Amino acid sequence: MSNTVASFSGDTGYNLTSISKVEIPTVPKDALLIKGIAYAANPTDWKHLVYGLGPKGSRLGTDVAGVVEEVGSEVKGFEKGDIVSHFMHGNTNPDNGAFQEYLIANPATTIKYNKSGFKTEALPSGQTTPIGKIDTFEGAASVTLGLVTIGLSFSHHLKISSNKADNADKYILIWGGATATGFLAIQVAKLVYGLKVIATASKKHHECLKNIGADYLVDYNDKDAVDQIRAIGGSKINYGFDAVSNKDTFQSLYDATSETKDVRLDNLLFLSEKDINADPNRKVYIGETLAYVVTGENVNFGGHMVYSSPELIAAYTNFWTEILPPYIPQLVHSNLKVLTPGFESIDVAFSLLRENKVSGEKLVFRRE
Ligand SMILES: NC(=O)c1ccc[n+]([C@@H]2O[C@H](COP(=O)([O-])OP(=O)(O)OC[C@H]3O[C@@H](n4cnc5c(N)ncnc54)[C@H](OP(=O)(O)O)[C@@H]3O)[C@@H](O)[C@H]2O)c1
């Protein structure tokens, strides 16, 4: 038996993917062997390749869903035949990536789904499947990177109490509620943590984001968006999560929380007070979430070192294994744009993401 895999062609134009057949990997003691069935594309995938973070030949992909084929001898809590989704740091080395027929998976970034009611048949390709329960391989593939990112941010950087009673009077501001990450962050903030949620998104997404748990929506295109947010949350916006993370969005997050004393802010692209017009008299914790560090890896991200730590791993692991699992059946995936089956769809997905043609949906595809 062979393993069909997608690797970086070395061309940084629009043909990033090369497809080949290799041996099926042997499962280490502490890992799972997963047979991938559906895959999701993320902005980080193409950025790794085009910005030189992964050399030619790196196996592609971060998000996959499939079935456990084999369980390493030291792994607890999984068995052959389990339906799972998995997030990994692909796009960096020739040994492992999510866009493979068979892949090695770390249980620490794997979600197990209830088999009862899970629909194994493929979603129709060439169409958009609307928001719904995570009960298909495509839906499962679309959520794992997002949930790992939110888990690390909320548990370690924002240090949100897992006791809902502590949060009933507190607000979180989620900038970019319509991003794939923001869409999940809204649900986790509301359902899991019981926070009041203020989210920014363009108007066309407001109704949908209200339906999944946002209490207040503000159009980020409005000139007075920051004032609108202050009028809603006042001095109680203790948490801010920037799912877009450019200097403008982070400045807005910082400004919108200025009336609150005890503020923790987080972003996904290493922005700090140096990148914005910050008030020297304000003390604000600013996190820099990078999902890849949850497995203990220290990551050099284009010259910027991001460190893991025992404290970080403990907070994330508690979220992943204790806090999140009971809520998985209540979460929904975003709209899924289902591409043609086959790894040829990888370049189609990367091009759409690169050209900012993705709005309020996730790009997913199956193997052929
Ligand atoms: N550090 C990490 O671990 C980590 C993890 C995941 C993602 N990321 C990074 O986070 C970013 C988001 O990734 P993603 O996959 O969640 O994004 P995505 O779904 O591809 O984001 C697209 C959405 O961004 C929204 N948007 C664009 N500009 C905005 C603005 N100024 N204010 C509010 N919303 C805006 C658009 O909303 P409208 O349709 O409303 O215009 C659009 O729907 C990427 O840069 C990604 O690389 C980092």
Image (cartoon, rainbow, N blue to C red):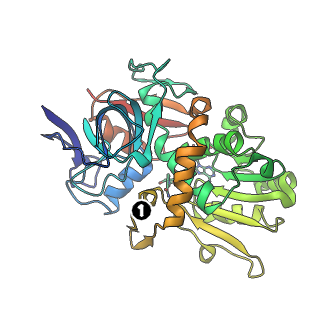
Vertical comparison of 234 with 107: above or below: below
Residue drawn at 29 percent across, 57 percent down:
92
Indicate the quadrant containing the C terminus: top left, top right, bottom left or bottom right.
Answer: top left
Q: Position of residue 249 (x, y in %)?
A: 64, 60
- Residue 36 visible from this viewpoint: no
Q: Is residue 247 left or right of residue 235?
A: left
Residue under label 1, please give it: 296
**Is the CB–ligand 1 distance for label 1 below 8 Å?**
no
**Residue 187 sits in quarter:** top right
Q: Residue at x 27, y 41 (%)?
A: 103
Dot 1 surroundings within 10 Å: few (below 14), some, or many (20 or more)? few
Tell me which residue sits at (39%, 63%) in the image: 297
* Secondary structure category for the residue under label 1: loop
Residue 134 x, y percent position in the rendering: 52, 28
Q: Quadrant of the N terminus?
A: top left
Position of 72 compared to 316: left or right? left
Quarter of the view holding residue 126? top left
| Amino acid at circle 1 | Gly
Left/right placement of residue 246 relative to residue 209 reads: left
| Spot occupied by residue 175 in the image (x, y as percentages of width and height) | 66, 52
